[in-house]
Amino acid sequence: MVINKKKVFVLGLDSIPPELLFDKWLDQLPNIKRLISNSIYGPLKSTIPAITCPAWVSMMTSANPGRLGLYGFRNRSSYDYEGLSFANSSTIYQDTVWDILSKIGKKVVVVGVPMTYPPKPVNGCMVTCFMTPDTKCDYTYPHELKAEVESVSNGYILDVGEFRSDNKDPILKTIYDMTEKRFRLTRHFIRSKEWDFFMVVEMGTDRIHHAFWKYFDEDHPKYIPGSQYQNAILNYYKYLDEEIGDTLKLLSDDTLILVVSDHGAKKMFGGICINEWLIQNGYLKLVQYPSETTQFNKLIVDWENTMVWGEGGYYGRIFMNVKGREPKGVIAPQHYEHFRNELIRKLEDLRDENGRNINTKVFKPEDIYTECNGIPPDLIV
């Protein structure tokens, strides 16, 4: 196939499940359906782990999480016990597609792509992502673009605060307001900026799934029948489709259009408190067991008698306390692999309250990545 296009426009929709977009609701999304009918489409395989960071960065650099040294939003920066550091654009050492294009003189526009804060110089302009602390920060490149963004959007919205709370009405309103402002800005940039490559990512899809999934999915363990929010996600998809349609109208015929996502979404039947499991199985020792649910970084760990702990991320990250590597290491290096395999067997045999295996997947980083930069977890669960 020969693709003779002069421009590339990439629309990212965070957390879009193919089951909803391609199957369940496609007939109610005329603009997306029209795009699909004239295109090649299908599900993309996400990264391991399938979360916003590192998935978007992997997509934009073609580097897997191990090569990036990014195993989630927070990563170990040393082998001590001082916790994890947050990833941002300064921790990306591979060139992104807009870096490469900028170097060869192509003009780029980048809006809302995760892991772009703090903004870096490009041959064009950039508006950073939901990871930006607030709009008081420098969130644009060049710096003076910020005034234009605020003026066009009438107050730009980077993200939805407290989107996991039970205060649903303001969450829903903010999601719509954020999306409207982002697409308004996108259309303004399409018309007013010189560009060869344009990429925008909308986070409203992720936030609405987090906030409203249980209201429409009848198989969700916390499904609430007859809720006023039962169609909240579908109605938002319809609204999003309208915004997409209004945006695509502005693109010339010589523009290649890509619509992509970083991961999907699904209901949760429960969660595993990995450190509680480690405590119960004798791997993690505390000086004093807390009287209430407590964040790991607020616990006093007996490191000299701790073999394993878990910390950080939307998935289980297992770190082993190894002699000669960690300051108070316990596991002898020659026993490392045997011990790691023992943990894998036990974790993959985890069962629910009814005795059913919950199909836990456990990975050794070196088995799934071509290289492991930075400090990877010993196990990815």
Image (cartoon, grey):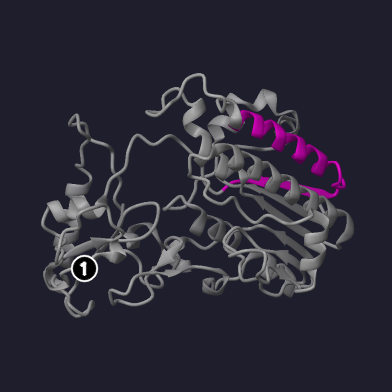
Q: Is residue 210 left or right of residue 202?
A: left
Q: Residue at x 55, y 38 (%)?
A: 168
Q: Nearer the viewer, residue 96 or 236?
A: 236
Span colored in magenta = 233-261
- Residue 237, magenta (yes or no): yes
Q: Position of residue 335 (x, y in %)?
A: 12, 67
Q: Is residue 48 left or right of residue 358?
A: right
Residue placed furthest toward the top: 226
How busy is the neighbourhood of tag 1: few (under 14 within 10 Å), some, or many (20 plus)?
few
Q: Position of residue 232 (x, y in %)?
A: 60, 30
Residue hosting label 1: 300
Q: Residue at x 20, y 37 (%)?
A: 351
Mark 1 element type: loop
Q: Quadrant of residue 125?
A: bottom right
Q: Position of residue 90 (x, y in %)?
A: 55, 74
Q: Amino acid at mark 1?
A: Ile
Q: Quadrant of the N terminus?
A: top right
Q: Quadrant of residue 188?
A: bottom right
Q: Nearer the viewer, residue 126 or 83?
A: 83
Relative height, residue 30 to residue 359 (above, below): above
Q: Quadrant of residue 221?
A: top left
Relative height, residue 357 to residue 192 (above, below): above
- Residue 156, magenta (yes or no): no
